[in-house]
Structure formats: structure tokens, C-alpha cells
Amino acid sequence: MIAAPEVRTEPNYLNAKEGVLSWLLTTDHKRIGLLYIASITAFFFIGGFFALMMRLELLTPPSDLVSPETYNKLFTMHGIIMVWFFLIPSIPATLGNFILPMMIGAKDLAFPKLNLASWYIFNLGAAVTLYAIIRGGVDTGWTFYTPLSTTYSTGYVVGAALGIFIAGFSSILTGLNFIATVHTMRCPGLTWFRLPLFIWSMYATSLVLVIATPILAITLTMVGVERIFQVGIFDPALGGDPLLFQHMFWFYSHPAVYVMVLPAMAVESELVAAFSRKPIFGYNAVAFSSLGIAIVGFLVWGHHMFVAGQSVYSALVFSILSYLVAVPSAIKVFNWTATLYKGSVSWDTPMLYAIGFIGLFTIGGMTGLFLAALGLDVHVTDTYFVVAHFHYIMVGGAVMAYLGGIHYWWPKISGRLYPEFLAKLSALTVFLGFNLTFFPQFILGYLGMPRRYAAYPPEFQMLHVLSTAGASILGAGYVLPLIYLTWSWRYGPKAPPNPWRATGLEWQTPSPPPVENFEETPVVNYEAYDYEAMKEKLALG
Amino acid sequence: MAETIQILPGREALAHRHHFATPEQQRETVMAGMWIFLATEIMMFGGLFMAYAVYRLGHPRAFELGSADMNVVLGSINTALLITSSFTMALAAHAAQEGRLRGLAWLLIATIVIGAVFLGIKFSEYYAHFREHRAPGVWYESKPNEPDPGGVEMFFVLYYIMTGLHAIHMLIGIGIMAVLWLMTLAGRFSRVYHSPVVVSTLYWGFVDIVWMFLFALFYLPGLHQGR
């Protein structure tokens, strides 16, 4: 491979300053994005390790590899780490941080110092939680249900909750930064309806982050107060109301699900447009469906409590609203699919991930409708059906899109190209491994296998073995990109400014970008994904 | 760029940071940031108001009894103090926008002093409750023959959490104003650059408004209760 040697010699954000301190004290959104990538990759593999231990335990019916107490801690730590220290920051804090300002033609986010602070706060929260894990772990499940968490649990509940409380502020700061940036930092000519759909979705995500996260903070504070001072807020034995906890927890945690999947949809819109070489079908519908999900997502939390003793009328309302939230999601899926129609589709790695996302997200979304149905939900509550459903959204949706996005923007981030064959192999491995892991769990759940048990009757073993086998393949699929992307960071062929010939502003600047992103502030006089208007520019690029 | 603001040479670097195109853009952005932050604050206190609503509906009589133990006179004085401090802070923002640094410095001092007096009164109230065993947890003791003692304790749990969180916000606000005061003395603010003062005024106003609700919810329900 003969690569142009002068690409890297131009000053860019990577070589502008040297030394560890220049990274730890940076206020450059691109470098902070990379810091976040390092942090969350570590947590992804820690959380994955807990999952692997669980799958190994479930290989055989009795609880033989680990004790039931340890198993309780394993699924709790898996949930806490994956939800708060990987999924929630995953796309916003990494790709969002790196790409969002570039997409709108800005030099940085609105508040660069807050952005750096958010990374430190995130790591502080993570350190506190890790300390709680090392000291003995938590066994309440990631949901911290009371009174188990406040009175009966012997784990380090306060430590874990404090870590999550702290990390929550990093989410709030990121969301606040994005909203302010999108409102005030768009380059000349870039009106709201010319914004790439990535921005719309990221904006909706940020709204959810800033509105929902404070509720989690105050709820966990009350859990901590109840546990430390032994006063009754949620514990019925002390005069509290455990349902109040569930309402407040899910008022945050259901919207938090959309914090995980809206950014995935953001990436998805970019990938589908770039590899179909067409504007997204129904731009306005896709843009408003992001806001629709953010708004309706706040009104459905009660579907987590269908069996918790809420009145049948509120259950009815929550059920109907939960059906309703599927509408904007469906609009997106239909519009991405319609975009493919008569597009010139190319099957590069990011597109493989994108197509995988559409399939898996559809299955995850449809089974969500099953769970929104009152009668069926009673049958599958707290079974593997629920586990499979949300992993199809969180892993099949969010992680697939995250990896697709990482591959898509990798040439921009690193200035290097990754090995295409290995990348395609990883996409395929992840897709197959994922389905093998989680599809059997739908059947398990429907047959009545409850979640959070270390032991099970022998007749479920076949399906559990399939799931564990799939998890090993999935694990290999995740390690693969870690290896070849790390390799390509140094040894990959140099990337041109716009390897995919995509239309976003981030592709109209060198790879890797200069410190201030653009040599001169761009001016936008065309619509998003307008391949016609950009014909000449793209032919040159 | 229809009009440009005259900036003294050497002051340009202070007027706006490099990633903003103009000082106006920076001002707008900083204001937007503070409004969004206040939205998160409303949600955070909102969770507690929600808990208050649930438990007061469940224990209406106990909440009145608990509230009867509040010192309404001190609470009213504090309310008046806080409104006054919002006024001095608003004047401070006005002074900053007009570039009157001397006035700004004195108004910040006034706001800090009033805020500190508020906190002093608040802590004296906490201490009085503590002496009467009305502090939740192991120190708490119900009064003999008190109806629904659990509900009364819940009132005090919420009282301490909510006014405590408010007091923490006051402390942070006083810290911010101390920094603003030092920045004022260092001559950092001007007619062009004063957003930190303006957004801090928004924050202080928010803290003030939260107190209005806390005062009404904790001090007033027991007002007509004979002791």
C-alpha cells in the first residue's frame, strides 16, 4: 500500500501537543471524545466479563460455578456497569463529543471546560462504584429496589449508588453542553432543517439526559438517606412507600432507555444515508420522531410496574402510551428502509452494522409491544423474555450502532483506515453471536424461566447452552475490533479526508482534523445529505 | 455582522473565548446553558416535591402537627431576607451590565452577607429541632400521645432533606458570589463581558423561588394548629 506520507505531517489535533498532560488537561472536544472512548471501552469489557461469568454459570442447571449470592452480585454489577458506565455515555460522550461540533461547523462545544469536567466526574463516579465492587459488590440488581436495597441487602449499596449519583452529573453536563451547542454554535447557513439527523437525535437524547437524570440523583439520594439514617422513606416497615421508589426510579430509567437508543438512531441515519448515497427518506418525519420518542418516552414508565400493584386504570393508560411510543420508532425503521430503495447501496463494514441494527432493533421493538400488552406482560414479567427484549434493544441496537459508528468515523478520528476484511468478519460474528445468545432467551422466557436465578430445571439446559455458546462467539466478535482498530491506529493506511464520499461537514476537513476543526468556518447552502448539490465537492474529495 | 462592539485593545481576549465567533454568541450560549441547568434543578427538587405530595396526601394531619413545630417567625424573617438578597443580586447584574464595578462589588457583598444571615438563622432552627429530638434517625423521639407518629417523622425527614438541599444550594451560591467579587476586584467585568454575573443572578433567583415553596409547604400548614 503506497500512502501519501504528507497527510500526517500537517498539524492536526493529535500531534498539535505532546505529552500525557496535554491529554489530561485538554479542552478539545475531539481529544475528550477519545478519553471517553478509552474509559468506556474498559468498562465495556469489565461488564462483559461479568456477563461471561453468568453465562458460564448457566451452562449447567445447578448453581455450581458460583454461589447464588455471587451470581446475584454478578448480574447486579453487569447491569450497573453496562447501563451507567457504558451504554449511557457510549455514543453521546464518544462519537457525539467528537462529531457533533464538527457536523454543525463549530470549533468546539459551547462549554469546553465543562466537557472535560464531565469526563473527570464520570471517572470519579466509576472509581467509587469500582471501589464498592472490590469491597464486596452489590446484590440488589441494577434497579436498587426498596426495601431490599435500603434495609435487607448486605452489599455496598451506598457506595454503588454514590458512584452512579456522581456519574449522573457527567451525563447532565454532556446533555447541557450539546443543547447549548446546537442552539447557538451552528455555522452560517446551517438552519435547523439542514442539520444532519444525527444532530436531531442527539439533541433529543440531551433533552432526556438533562430532564431525567436529576430524578435519578434525588431518588438515589433518598435511598442513601434511608439506608444510612434508617428513616422510612421507601421501606414500608418504617412507614415509607416502596411503590414511590419504583415510580421515581422508572421515571428516570425508562427515558434512560431512550438515552441509549436515540444516539444509536442518530448514527443509523448517518450510516444509511452515506451508504445508500441518498438523502434520508422523509427527513422531517425522522427528525420529529426523535423528539416524539423523547417526549412520549417520559410517559410510559408505569409499564415496568404492571405487576407491582398499580391500579388497573393507570396500567391501561401506561399500556396504551407504551404502544404509542412504538410509532415514532417504527417511522424511523420504515424511513431507513425506504432510503435503501433505489439507492446505490454499498456494503462496507459500517453498513453491515447498520443493516444488522435495523433487523435487531425491529425484533427488540416488536417484542417491546408484546410486553406493553397487559395480559401477556403478566405471563412473561421477570422472565428471560424481558432480558432478551431489552438486550435486543441495548446490545443489538445500541452496541451495533456504536460499532458501526466507530468504524464509519474511525478514518476521521484516527486518520487511518482499518482492515476491511477483518472488520466485515467482526460485523458478521457480532450479528450471529448476538442472535445465538439472545434469541433462545425469548423461548426460555416464554417457557417460564425467570431471570436472576443461578439454577434452573434440567429441561431448560439445551437453550441455555445455545445462549452461552452464542455469548462466546459474541465475545470474540467484540475483541476483534479492539485488536485491529488498535493496530490500525499506528499501522493502518492513511485515510483521505472523505473516504466514504459522505456529505457531512465533518468530512470536508482533513483526517485527522486540525485543532479548530476547519481551516475556515464553513458556510452551508444546501440541505442535509444533498448529494446533487455536493456532486462537484464529492468528486474532488 | 451589522455592527461591531468597540473593545479596548488587550481586552479582546477577555471579551470572548476562541471558539465563539462574537461576544454576543458567547453571551447567548452562557445564558442558554444556565437556563438548561435550572431545568435540571427543577427536576431534582421536583422529585422531592413529588415525595412530599405523596406523603402529605397520606398523612395530612401528621404534616400539620409536624409543621406546628416550625418557628414561623424565623421562617418569615428568612423569607424576607432571601427576597431582599434576590433584589440586591438583580441590582448587581444591572450594575455589571452598565460596567459600574464599584457598585457591583458592594452589591455582591450585600448579597453574600444576607445569604449568610439566612443560613445562620436556618442552622439555629436545625439546632433547636435537634434539641427537641426532632431530627430524623436515631435521635428522633415522638411526642407522647402524638397521633400518627410515623407521619410526623416523615414530615421531618422531608423537611431536613429538602431544606438541607436548599441550604447546600445557598452555600454554593455564596461561594460563586465570592468568586465573582474577586473577579470584580480584578477588573474582569465590563459592559462587554459580564455573563458570569448575569447567569449567577438567574441561579440565585432560582434558589430564592425554591425557598418560597419550601416556606409555604413546611412552615404554613401548621399555622392554625394550637400548640
Image: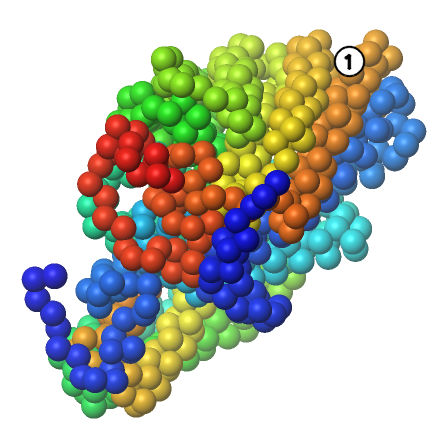
Location of residue B220 by image quarter: bottom left
At x 43%, y 58%, the residue is: A514
Asked which secondary structure carries label 1, the reply is helix
Q: Residue furthest left?
A: B2
At x 18%, y 84%, the residue is: B8
User: Which quadrant would the C terminus of chain A be assigned to in this image?
Assistant: top left
The residue type indicated by label 1 comes to: Leu
Which residue has dot 1 on it?
Answer: A463
Task: Report the front residue among A283 and A467.
Answer: A283
Can I make out residue B92 in this image?
Answer: no
| For residue A511, above or below residue B178 | above
Location of residue B180 by image quarter: bottom left
Q: Is residue A126 left or right of residue A53?
A: left
Task: Report the front residue among A372 and B15.
Answer: B15
Badge 1 crowding class, 10 Å Cα cut-off, few under 14, some 14 to 19, many 20 or more, is: many
Q: Chain of mark 1?
A: A
Q: Residue furthest right?
A: A64
User: Which quadrant would the N terminus of chain A be assigned to in this image?
Assistant: top right
Residue A319 is situated, as x and y percent measured from the top left of the image, at: 44, 18
